[in-house]
Amino acid sequence: MIIKPKVRGFVCVTAHPEGCAAHVQEWIDYVQAPAPIKNGPKRVLVIGASTGYGLASRVAAAFGSQAATLGVFFERPSEEGRTATPGWYNSIAFTQAARAAGLYAKSINGDAFSDDIKQQALNLLRADLGQVDLVVYSLASPRRTHPKTGAVHKSTLKPVGAPYTNKTVDTDKGVVSTVTIEPANEQEIADTTAVMGGEDWEMWMQALADARLLAPGAQSVAYSYIGPEVTWAIYKNGTIGLAKNDLERAAKNIDSLLKFNGGGRAFISVNKALVTQASSAIPVVPLYISILYKIMKERGTHEGCIEQIYRLFATQMYNGATPKFDESGRVRIDDWEMRPEIQAAVRTIWPRVTTENLADETDIAGYRREFLKLFGFGLAGVNYEAETEPHRTLP
Ligand code: NAD
């Protein structure tokens, strides 16, 4: 089969196995180039391990620190004549590369919110690794079936309290328009917190603690975003931001649990806005990212997921000292994004962007390249005209 991108709004419904493998290899090469992460993690559980920040965490742990990794994710496998979701191909490529390097790598594909998948992970960890010294929680999901009540919660990306009107871009068509998003109701706020808040992270950590699978001093990190004022109504002060507040609440509880477990810690790392499957679904944010990329690339401070997570591990979590926390106890690897001169430049460009000048005022071309790369398209060295077998199995 010759596999081409089929973009539908903010998703691409096809993915290229060799392209995804080339993308994963770029990340592996990135973390192998510098010195290994000193005193880095050795036995790592990554929840949400197949794409974006979670995959970057898995790659950084394995290839930057020689860690054994168990990855949990929820991807659609390939079938005869039908491509998988990219995280499936990413995980195949990661596993092959890790094992070729002599590293333990196993994965569980299923709903991380369920008791069943948690139990499967506990069983595998007990049998294969004994204990873990790092748990990365990097889920981004549109829904969650609650394991105790059976209720299905759907997350929404809406403002809270009042309608929000701002510019947005259709990244596929390149059209800038004004969008008004009506505020969420109480149920939508509660549902978004049930999906993207901290309860499930707490359930994972409690289950690992009860099963005595946390090594003394084990750490756990989950990822969040804050961003600039122009996106606050839809992000920081919107339904997703309220869910992230709940993630911060959970971080404090888990931190107490881990402190008690041989002096470990749990915290939130606030990461940079990047093109991922999750962020491309948020209104307004892709326009902000397109402007941000242009400015940060011009100044030589642009980073992707792998650069961000390598920096988190090497300079914060495993730097031989305590990470640098902000006033709310979070690690800030969004620090370069939030530099005043970067944000001042965003504020200058924002009001003047139109459909006509989008290509000049923003890095929409870079956004689109990054977006297609998420699905394995546009990678150097991949022959996209060649016949490719879409049906691949996870080793
Ligand atoms: P992503 O969509 O690339 O990855 C999500 C991961 O979650 C995938 O591995 C997917 O398989 C997994 N997943 C989803 N539902 C699942 C389920 N039910 N069971 C098991 N696995 C499931 O997203 P991302 O952008 O890397 O986001 C990861 C975290 O980073 C999120 O908490 C997000 O809020 C945060 N974050 C993202 C950005 C950004 O700009 N992308 C910035 C800062 C923080």
Image (cartoon, helix red, strand yellow):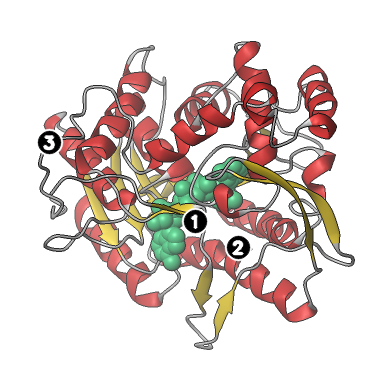
The residue singled out by tag 2 in the image is: 196
Q: Kindly state the secondary structure of the residue where label 3 is placed.
A: loop
Mark before the other along the chain sequence, 3 or 1: 1
Amino acid type for the residue under numbered disc 2: Met
Mark before the other along the chain sequence, 1 or 2: 1
Write down the quadrant of residue 105 in the picture: top left
Q: Are marks 1 and 2 in contact (CB under 8 Å)?
A: yes
Q: Are marks 3 and 1 in contact (CB under 8 Å)?
A: no
- Whether the residue carrying mark 2 lies under 8 Å from ligand 1 is answered with yes
Quick check: can you spot residue 137?
A: no
The residue singled out by tag 3 in the image is: 386
- Residue at mark 3 to residue at mark 1: CA–CA distance: 34 Å
Q: Kindly state the secondary structure of the residue where label 2 is placed.
A: helix
Amino acid type for the residue under numbered disc 3: Ala
The residue singled out by tag 1 in the image is: 139
Residue occupying image coordinates x 45% and y 43%: 52
Residue occupying image coordinates x 60% and y 63%: 196
